[in-house]
Amino acid sequence: MKRSSIVFALVIVCLVLVMAVSVNGAAKKIVVGFSQIGAESAWRTADTESIISEAKKYPNIVLKFSDAQQKPENQIKAMRSFIAQKVDVIGFTPVVETGYEPVLREAKRAHIPVIIIDRMVDVKDNSLWVTHMGSDMVEEGRKVVRFMVEKGWKGNVAEMVGTVGSSAAIGRHQGFNEMLKDHPEFKVILSESGNFTRSEGKQCMEAFLKAQGKNINILFAHNDDMAIGAIQAIEEYGLKPGVDIKIISIDATHDGFQAMIEGKLNCVVECNPLLGPQFYEAVQNLMAGKKLPKETVTKEGVFPMEVAKDVMPTRKY
Ligand code: GYE
């Protein structure tokens, strides 16, 4: 072969290689649309941070993040827009359990897999989502009762419920109340929603105190933020949180630990919001054609106030 033909052939080979790499490179980008609930609590802020910051560790992942500001209709809109944009995967945490079935069907028809993290949907057709990862909310409610029993607490209980219709509130309420049936030493005298926020938690506690005052012995708040709002209300009412009224909540955030160190919160049941790493691992596996487990439950602990000071430095959210 002539020298010029060899050079020509080499140039062609190089061109083909460059094209293959760039086509492949482009094909390797995975576009993920994520619909988040909002920013109602410290837990949610940590969860959002985990999802956004973890995405940056994957050069092949492009994240389109959408904040629904607590409105399911905003989530439905966001998901429709993800479908229209033909994203590769939809990640999603539903505000409440119901109302998403039509949009999930649309995603399925468009062959876009949906990964649900944290809160869950209640749909008849489980093929509408590929995998769910998050906490066992019912078990968290049971852990609260186990702690109360272990500590020998008794008396009148006020239950401060999370967002009405959310799987987190439904599960925690269920686990808590089911287990209480075997414990006549407790009597639930109040149960109202504080919507998982600090300000509504404070308002809810003010209403509880107005209705029952010193009759309340124990407060179970479905999350730390509401417990912290309640602590303010209890102090303003002239009682000592953690002493006059025992308090237990769920999440185990920094602020929850701080309140325990100050002796105002007796116990936190852990609920881990750092779901980013698990989420993107699932995205990668899914795109690689691997079969995912239908359900992955996060492992979590229980922290009484006595250990708060020692454990606090190890906490990541
Ligand atoms: O406990 C609460 C948040 O869905 C598990 O939502 C989550 C809950 C969490 O706002 O703080």
Image: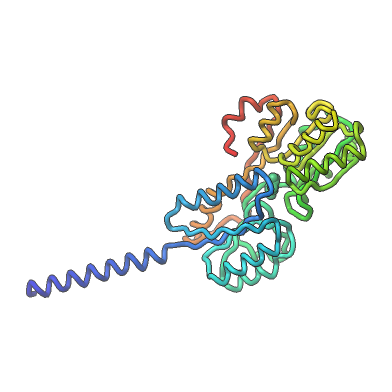
Locate residue 114 relative to residue 27 in the image: left or right: right
- Give percent across and percent down for residue 9: 17, 73
Dividing the picture into quarters, in which one does residue 34 lie? bottom right
- Give percent across and percent down for residue 48: 59, 50
Residue at x 27%, y 67% (from the top left corner): 17
Locate residue 168 relative to residue 217 in the image: left or right: left
Quarter occupied by the C terminus: top right
Is residue 65 visible to us here? yes
Q: Between 284 and 70, which is closer to the camera in this rendering?
A: 70
Quarter occupied by the N terminus: bottom left
Q: Is residue 190 above or below residue 311?
A: below
- Give percent across and percent down for residue 21: 32, 65
Q: Between 94 and 49, which is closer to the camera in this rendering?
A: 49
Dividing the picture into quarters, in which one does residue 189 lie? top right
Residue at x 70%, y 67% (from the top left corner): 101
Label count reads 0
